[in-house]
Image (cartoon, rainbow, N blue to C red):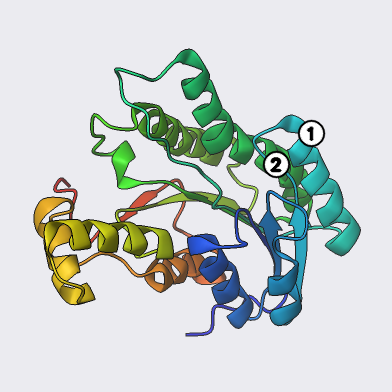
């Protein structure tokens, strides 16, 4: 399937590693010019050199100054973007018993306002061209929050709500806004963490065996496994294309059926 992204320019936040990197690489493989983003200077430079038609920018987008810095770099490099993937987001280890006001504010800055600020930066140019795609990376925790990380789940819930509001604001502009909400994703960090647990609890070292325990104890779902990063990236890439032009204002779960409601 040709997603017709050859003349599109995409910024993917938090794309120097993890799922964001795979999203950016996937968009590039579909022909888009991609801008990798990192929080620290130089952290995405090697990726931009490796990938065809790619650039790198940096800035702490949990702050107003950092978002302005990223926007200025993007403008200097490519002028305008067509696609904004707000992949950047940070979980927490907080619990109700030990989280303070500062934790909640920080989570909101990182997981909501970073996306809001960048959208505000780039939407005017998208409006002028009559086409744009904004994709937010959420979590099924906003559908089905647990008692751990309450500040993170609350922030991601706000991100999804904000995105629906933004969809209404952008009616008849040619810009769509959607949220992609994964469950567990097999990132290097998640795999390493579960391998450490497997070693402690005697699960063995075969990933398939470990994954069965993850599903049984942490993430029950009808598919019987967790998502690969590429699967999330493929969904994001499709939503960025012309083929998804009538998908708008949605919070799409990619969780193997873990959340059980219609």
218 lies left or right of 57:
left
Residue carrying label 2:
60
Residue shown at 65%/48% (left/top)?
Answer: 173
Left/right of residue 23 with respect to residue 207 in the rendered view: right
Q: Look at the numbered disc 2 and give the secondary structure of its residue.
A: loop
Specify the quadrant of the image occupied by residue 56: bottom right
Where is residue 82 shown, x and y percent of the image? 70, 60
Q: Residue at coordinates 70% horizontally, 81% vertically from top-left? A: 50
Q: Residue furthest top?
A: 101
Q: Which residue is drawn at 58% across and 30% down?
A: 109
Residue 222: horizontal and vertical position, in percent?
Answer: 11, 63
Position above or below: 65 against 188: above
- Work out how far the residue at label 1 is from the one at label 2, CA to CA, in angstroms: 8 Å
Q: Is residue 130 left or right of residue 98?
A: right
Q: In this view, does 92 lie above or below 182?
A: above
Of residue 210 and residue 156, the one placed in the foreground of this image is: 210
**CA neighbours of label 2 inside 10 A, class few (<14), some (14 to 19), many (20+):** many
| Tags 1 and 2 touching, CB below 8 Å | yes
Q: Which residue lies furthest to the bottom in this view?
A: 1
Residue 224 shows in this picture: no
Residue 5 vertical placement versus 150 (above, below): below
Of 197 and 217, which appears nearest the observer?
197
Work out whether residue 87 can be spotted: yes
- Precedes in sequence: disc 1 or disc 2: 2
Mark 1, other Cα within 10 Å: few <14 / some 14–19 / many ≥20? few
Q: Name the residue under label 1.
A: 65
Residue in view at x 41 percent, y 59 percent: 189
Q: Where is residue 257 in the image (x, y as percent from the top left)?
A: 18, 58
Q: How many labels does the image show?
A: 2
Which corner quadrant of the image does residue 69 belong to? top right
Measured as percent of width and height from the top left, residue 119 is found at 66, 42
């Amino acid at each position: 399937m040709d997603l017709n992204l050859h003349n599109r320019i995409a910024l993917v936040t938090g794309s120097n590693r993890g799922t964001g990197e795979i999203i950016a690489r996937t968009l590039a493989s579909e022909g888009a010019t991609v801008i990798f983003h990192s929080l620290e200077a130089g952290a995405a430079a090697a990726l931009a050199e490796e990938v065809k038609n790619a650039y790198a920018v940096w800035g702490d987008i949990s702050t107003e100054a950092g978002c302005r810095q990223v926007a200025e770099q993007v403008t200097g490099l490519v002028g305008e973007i067509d696609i904004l993937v707000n992949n950047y987001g940070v979980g927490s280890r907080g619990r109700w018993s030990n989280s303070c006001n500062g934790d909640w504010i920080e989570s909101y800055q990182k997981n909501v306002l970073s996306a809001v600020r960048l959208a505000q930066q780039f939407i005017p140019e998208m409006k002028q061209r009559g086409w744009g795609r904004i994709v937010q990376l959420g979590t099924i925790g906003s559908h089905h929050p647990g008692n751990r990380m309450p500040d993170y789940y609350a922030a991601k819930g706000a991100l999804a709500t904000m995105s629906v509001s933004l969809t209404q604001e952008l009616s008849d502009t040619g810009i769509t806004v959607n949220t992609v909400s994964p469950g567990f994703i097999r990132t290097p960090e998640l795999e390493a963490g579960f391998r450490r647990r497997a070693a402690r609890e005697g699960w063995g070292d075969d990933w398939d065996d470990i994954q069965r325990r993850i599903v049984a104890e942490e993430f029950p779902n009808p598919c019987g496994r967790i998502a690969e990063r590429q699967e999330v990236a493929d969904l994001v890439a499709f939503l960025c294309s012309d083929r998804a032009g009538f998908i708008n204002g949605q919070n799409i779960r990619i969780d193997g059926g873990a959340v059980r409601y219609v």
